[in-house]
Each structure stands twice: as structure tokens, then as C-alpha cells.
Image (cartoon, rainbow, N blue to C red):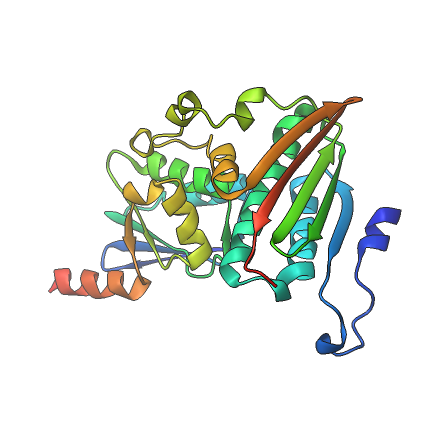
Amino acid sequence: MNLYAESVEGVLLVRVSEERLDAAIAIRFKDRMREVTAQPAARVVLDMSQVDFLDSSGLGAVVAVMKSLAPGRKLELAGLTPNVEKVFRLTRMDSVFRIHADISDVTREGIRNAG
Amino acid sequence: MLADRAARPPARKDAASDRPDAKIFHHSFAADALSVRSALRSALARFMRQMTRDEAGTLELVLAEVLNNIVEHGYGDSGHGTITLSMVRDRRGLSCSISDDGIELPTECLLQSDTVQEMRPQPDHLPEGGFGWFLIRDLAEDLGYHRGNGRNLLAFRLPLKPL
């Protein structure tokens, strides 16, 4: 399970460096995210631009991560590829996440807010 | 493993254009998450040239949900079993059938009634599961199930743009 995290302007950016977020990896993803998000950050943004395939187990894991951050922090998503976006849309789970088209939108915003 | 080897395409020495489009795919594999991954990869590769990227994404999602349900619920705690996936391409799309020797599929998985639709996971409740069968029913057509001689047989069609 390859996750890369960096803190930019108080935003914890976590890049999922995997082609698939599926049943085979969902539990490891949740465990690794728990470790990675242990460090303090007001916002956590998951960069999914390298993930080509998400199934319902992967979706459940992303939701579980979001719940583990509550109530203090929210999980935001960035860079959903077409197949991944479709799963969020069909399950209507796109309504519960703040979704950024691209991770650069988040960093720009962070820098602007830091002003 | 014999079926596995038989189902694999021949060595790819010839140019892609020399080969006729694949019509059938047949594959038996162990019921675990990593074998499901590899079966999906082979199945997708077999029909990739006949599908749009969007159709391929839909096919992979439906198959993944069906196969992972068998791994997690059909065989569940027993930890081992075999799944057989067969796919046939015809003019209108792909006919898929999946068989396994796991426990019987609960009937509510296949129902399309309003009552079942109300059981759809509600986004604001932040559900972590229960999406699988709704995705399958939303994306697959002519979904059918038969149980006989301790075996489950699930079949469905996936429409594709005409050849």
C-alpha cells in the first residue's frame, strides 16, 4: 500500500500511489491512513489521481477514513479519474465529500488563504 | 489450473490486427481477493479492443462486485473455494455467467422492488458498505440466478455499443 503524505500550508496532502483501491487493499488502506493522519493538520486531502479503479470496498474504506477524522477534521478528495468518479456518482457519495478537480486547486487555495 | 491455462490467449507474436476479436472468455480461479484481481485483468484484456474506456470501467466494476461478494459472503469464513467466470461476446454486448460452490445467495440481492430500493445506502448516513448489489443491479441487465446441486449460477448481460 503506497501512500505519500506531505503537509502544505497546514493541509495534509495524501497521494494514493496505487492503480486500484479495491477489496484486496481496502483494509491496508484504512490502516495506513490511520497512521498517516495521526499528525495534526486542519484539512486532509486525498489525491486519487493515480487510482484508475475503485470498487465498493475501496469506497467503504474512503468513507471509514472520513469518519475516523470526524468531528474535528474532514476528508476532502482530489483528482478523481473517470471510473472512480462514476462510483461516487452512482452511489451518490459524491454529495458527502468536498471534491477538487485537481490537487493543484487545493495547494493554490492554501497559499492564497495563508496570504 | 488446467482451465486456467486453456483460457489464456496464445502467445502474442502476431500483430494485433491479424487476430480476430475475442468471442469467449472462460476462467476458473481461487476465491480470494488477489485471484479476483488477476481474473479481472485477464477478462478486461480479452475484450478491451471491443469496448470504450467507459464500458470497460463498467464491466470491471460489475464483475469486481459480483466476484468479491462470492469471496466475502459466498465462501466467507471457509477461506477457500473456486469461482468460474464465463463471458461470451455477441452483437449487443457481453453475456457473463459466474458459478461457485459457496452458500446460497440471499433472494433480496436480486430484487428490484421499491422496498429494496429504499434499503439503498443513504449518503448522509456515511455507509461503509452495502453498495455492491445496488451497483450490480444498476449497471447489469437481465440479471438471473439459479441454485442447483449446491452450486450458484449468476448470469447477466452488459450492453456494449454494437460491433
- Image location (x, y in percent) of residue B6: 86, 54
Q: What residue sits 33% from the left and 46% below the top? A: A39
- Residue A31 appears anywhere in the view: no
- Reply above or below: B119 against B66: above
- Image location (x, y in percent) of residue A1: 54, 51
Q: What residue sits 79% from the left and 62% below the top? A: B9
- Reply above or below: A43 against B51: above
Quarter the C terminus of chain A occupies:
bottom left
Q: Residue furthest left?
A: A115
Judged left or right of residue A11, residue A93 is: right
Q: Residue furthest right?
A: B2
- Image location (x, y in percent) of residue B70: 65, 32
Q: What residue sits 29% from the left and 46% below the top? A: A40
Q: What residue sits 59% from the left and 21% below the top? A: B106
For the image shown, how many numbered marks are present on the structure? 0
- Residue A53 appears anywhere in the view: yes
- Image location (x, y in percent) of residue A61: 45, 39
- Reply above or below: A6 against B26: below
Which quarter of the figure has residue A23? top right
